[in-house]
């Protein structure tokens, strides 16, 4: 049916009115929809298209932990879209998607709107299993260990203030390559006093989401 509609002239890049979802975003709503992706791509569906809430269909699939969908989209997705997909997988503890992205050689060099790298998000959100998975590919993002985000913080700064009960001893050090002395140093750094404050860019995003949801309910 999908091919028939596309052959009849249906636009695979038509965006929904509120969320700006395209057909590839819709194909990420259920894992068994992945079989529609090759035909959508064949007829020109834009794998780099952003919606209101997602940087790309690949990010959407990664956040849902749909590994087969990630694989179907990966080759057609530009490398600069990979970082947001990896971040989504880390934040949602989507291990199947994260493993697939790493296995396929996802580009780990990017930063998001707040200047944060993959390692920043690992330091903030990752659990033991996620960190172990990322540590196996640590050579892909060694360059990001000392990168500062827009708040002036490195990944180790965020790792240092996580409660000790959240992670196994030494697990974060295996990913970030920091020792206890380094962890103690960043804990005492002055700008960690307000480490739990969100960056302004994140607050703006949250506000935008709330406005979109309110507008959707009114319609």
Image (cartoon, rainbow, N blue to C red):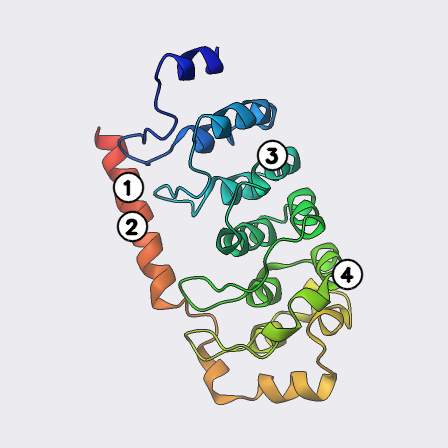
Residue that mark 2 sits on = 208
CA neighbours of label 4 inside 10 A, class few (<14), some (14 to 19), many (20+) = few
Q: Earlier in the sequence, mark 4 or mark 1?
A: 4
Tag 1–tag 2 contact (CB < 8 Å): yes
Tell me: 74 left or right of 46.
Answer: right
Considering the numbered disc 3 on the image, is that residue within a helix, a strand or a loop?
helix
Total labels: the figure holds 4
Residue drawn at 71 percent across, 69 percent down: 175
Whole-angstrom CA distance, mark 3 to mark 2, is 30 Å
Q: Nearer the viewer, mark 3 or mark 2?
A: 3
Q: Nearer the viewer, mark 4 or mark 3?
A: 3
Residue that mark 4 sits on = 136
CA neighbours of label 3 inside 10 A, class few (<14), some (14 to 19), many (20+) = some
Residue that mark 3 sits on = 72
Considering the numbered disc 1 on the image, is that residue within a helix, a strand or a loop?
helix
Whole-angstrom CA distance, mark 1 to mark 3, is 29 Å
Q: Which of 112 and 107 lies nearest the eye of the viewer?
A: 107
Q: Earlier in the sequence, mark 1 or mark 3?
A: 3
Residue 212 tag number: 1
CA neighbours of label 1 inside 10 A, class few (<14), some (14 to 19), many (20+) = some
Residue 59 tag number: none
Residue drawn at 30 percent across, 46 percent down: 210
């Amino acid at each position: 049916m999908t091919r028939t509609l596309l052959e009849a002239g249906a636009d695979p890049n038509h965006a929904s009115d509120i969320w700006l979802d395209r057909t590839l975003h819709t194909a990420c709503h259920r894992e068994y929809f992945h079989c529609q992706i090759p035909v959508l791509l064949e007829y020109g569906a834009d794998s780099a298209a952003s919606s209101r809430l997602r940087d790309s269909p690949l990010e959407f699939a990664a956040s849902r932990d749909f590994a087969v969908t990630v694989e179907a989209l990966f080759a057609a997705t530009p490398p600069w879209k990979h970082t947001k997909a990896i971040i989504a997988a880390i934040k949602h503890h989507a291990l199947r998607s994260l493993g697939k992205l790493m296995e396929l050689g996802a580009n780990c060099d990017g930063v998001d709107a707040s200047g944060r790298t993959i390692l920043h998000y690992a330091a903030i959100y990752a659990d033991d299993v996620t960190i172990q998975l990322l540590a196996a590919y640590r050579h892909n993002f060694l360059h990001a260990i000392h990168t500062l985000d827009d708040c002036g913080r490195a990944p180790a700064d965020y790792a240092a203030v996580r409660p000790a009960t959240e992670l196994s001893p030494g697990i974060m050090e295996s990913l970030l390559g920091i020792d206890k002395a380094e962890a103690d140093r960043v804990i005492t750094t002055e700008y960690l006093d307000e480490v739990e404050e969100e960056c302004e860019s994140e607050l703006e995003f949250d506000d935008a989401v709330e406005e979109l949801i309110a507008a959707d309910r009114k319609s």
